[in-house]
Amino acid sequence: MDYSTLGYEIGAEGGVAVITLDRPEVMNALDAQMRAELRHALTAAGQEARVVVLTGAGRAFCSGQDLGAGSGAAGLDLEQVLRDEYMPMLQAIVECPVPVIAAVNGAAAGAGANLALAADVVIAAEGAVFVQAFTRIGLMPDAGGTWMLPRLIGQARALGAALFAERITARQAADWGMIWEAVPEDGFEARWRGRAQQLAEGPGVAFANIRRAMRESWSNDFETQLTLEGRLQGECGQTRDFREGVVAFNEKRPPKFEGR
């Protein structure tokens, strides 16, 4: 499929798919077309690749909802847009069968910040910032922000970020546990590409089961979680990757995983 708002590339042998938000003239703001295309691209990448990277073109990652799109943001039925467009887009990230990395190259604001935080791993350039900008226009955080932020950084910081709508630097976000790491600008792309390749060469079933177990843990009691762990670990134990991992460990060499 040809995309008008995205760049889409996939590496050799279907290892890493890179989806680039490509509306730099509006700091990659999300309009209806981009939301639809992003959902499609994430679904396709989940079938074609072993890991997906989501990044932005130009100086921003994503500035959030396009406030100038269509007839103007003030005329939108926000509940309907969130239900029909944002929810499927975010679910495409969470339900992607392979790991998703957000490579945050610049500003991530409003829904753009929460789009990044929906990924499994967030790697940000040190010049990037995260802003829960919603109250600046009389709104509350959406796109999963009220669910993700308290879980990532705790209630006190989540409330402060939402109420004050102040910039959180990439380094601060990393120190708080909001993201995985902040990387110097000159090594940013090499870092996220290296991390993506590392995951692409890893044990795919184990990755999928880790993601599922971590997400379900929030709604499970301890006994239920132990039962889930046992079942998912049993699946991992039946894979070629587990057998290869044990053999490689005994032979003192790096394992060669299938990746799926």
Image: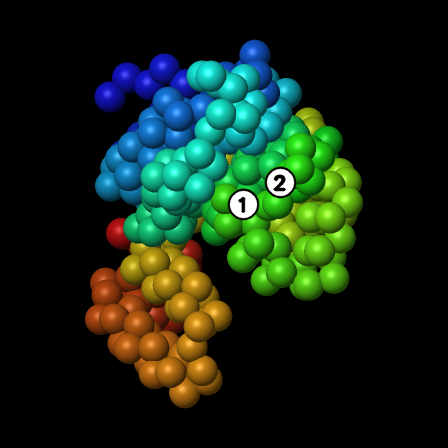
Q: Amino acid at mark 2?
A: Leu
Q: Are marks 1 and 2 in contact (CB under 8 Å)?
A: yes
Depth check, front residue: 44 or 69: 69
Q: Dot 1 surroundings within 10 Å: few (below 14), some, or many (20 or more)? A: some
For the residue labelled by badge 1, is the local secondary structure a helix, a strand or a loop?
loop
Q: Is residue 21 visible?
A: no
Query: Is 110 situated left or right of 80 in this image?
Result: right
Q: Quadrant of the N terminus?
A: top left
Depth check, front residue: 114 or 9: 114
Residue ID at (56%, 31%)? 64
Residue ID at (36%, 15%)? 4
* Front tag of 1 and 2: 2
Residue 137 in picture, x, y percent from top left: 67, 33
For the residue labelled by badge 2, is the local secondary structure a helix, a strand or a loop?
loop
Residue ID at (23%, 65%)? 239
Q: Is residue 123 above or below residue 5?
A: below
Query: Is 260 situated left or right of 102 in this image?
Result: left
Residue 95 in picture, x, y percent from top left: 34, 51
The number of numbered discs placed on residues in the rendered structure image is 2
Q: Is residue 153 above or below residue 32?
A: below
The image quadrant of residue 140 is top right
Q: Is residue 202 above or below residue 75?
A: below
Q: Is residue 37 visible?
A: yes
Query: Is 68 situated left or right of 127 in this image?
Result: left
Residue named by callout 1: 142
Q: Amino acid at mark 1?
A: Asp
Mark carried by residue 139: 2
Residue 28 in picture, x, y percent from top left: 53, 22
Q: Dot 2 surroundings within 10 Å: few (below 14), some, or many (20 or more)? A: few
Residue 161 in picture, x, y percent from top left: 72, 49
Q: Is residue 21 above or below residue 53?
A: above
The image quadrant of residue 45 is top left
